[in-house]
Amino acid sequence: MDVKSLGIGPISKDLLYIKIVDAIHAHIRRNGLKPGDKLPSEREMAESFQTSRNSVREALRVMENQGMLEVKTGRGTFLRERGDENVSVSIGIIKNNFREIQELTHILDSACLRKAVERATVPERRKLIRLAEEMNDDLADGFFNEATDHAFHGQLGAMSGNTALAELARSLREEVFGAYWSCLDFDTNLRLETVPNHLHMARAVLDNDLARAQTELDTISRHTLMTMDLVERTALHAEKS
């Protein structure tokens, strides 16, 4: 196959695998490919995009995980039959600017926090504190417990009393960002610095102090953005080297 026939020129290396996903989608639409049709090889796409095969492989892995592709060993990569083009919220969002997604997640968390301070029971608030204390116990061992972190934010969402709000926040955090982090070389211990903020926020919720709790949540969000910058710069450096 003539790699120029893909019709895609060089692309920038900022969140490269996401741009490659977009380019593959464009190739599929432009060529009218159907389920069962074969995609160009990793080598052909890497040559067309003027990037590494590893970056192409990451993009293909994202699409495979979302049920869009099927990799057949020794035969190649094929479009997969899908019953619904909107299988999950993450499929439509995954290619967007992740800083905007982080901003949306923060807005949803803030709404959960406000409602939790307004309506949560004392036992619910104490459970939030226990989860934060578990995170702090792991901090003493230099370990960020991602499962407990998800449980903490899940509890905050449950305390809001709004199931739709809580589920959307959970989906963005666990599904969309789960796919995001899984495609980067990411050490969850980079989040250790935010562990005390979780406990401070939980105690502020117990004290009915929304302003103090919001300050801690804002700090966690800013740290997440800084971590994203660091991880992406590291990935970009590795791509160039």
Image (cartoon, grey):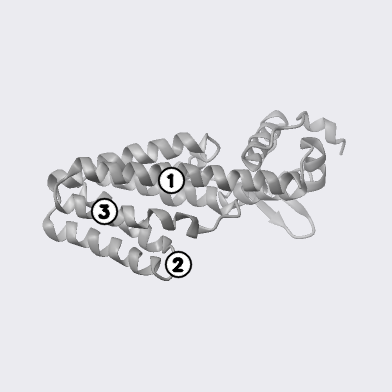
Q: Position of residue 42 (x, y in %)?
A: 77, 47
User: Would residue 81 be seen by someone viewing this image from the given angle?
Assistant: no
Mark 1 — residue? 223
- Between the residue at mark 2 and the residue at mark 3, the CA separation in whole angstroms equals 19 Å
The residue labelled by disc 2 is 142
Q: Position of residue 41 (x, y in %)?
A: 79, 46
Circle 1 Cα neighbour tier, 10 Å, few/some/many (<14 / 14–19 / ≥20): some
**Cα distance between the residues tagged 1 and 2:** 18 Å
Quadrant occupied by the N terminus = top right
Q: Can residue 46 be seen in the rendering of this structure? A: yes
**Badge 3 local density, few (<14 within 10 Å), some, or many (20+)?**
some
- Type of residue at label 3? His
Q: What is the secondary structure assignment of the residue under circle 3?
A: helix
Q: Whole-Å distance between the Cαs marked 1 and 3?
A: 15 Å
**Residue at coordinates 39% horizontally, 43% vertically from top-left?**
221
| Residue bearing the label numbered 3 | 200
Along the viewing direction, whichever of 140 and 10 lies nearer the viewer: 140
**Is residue 96 toward the left or the right of residue 102 in the image?**
right
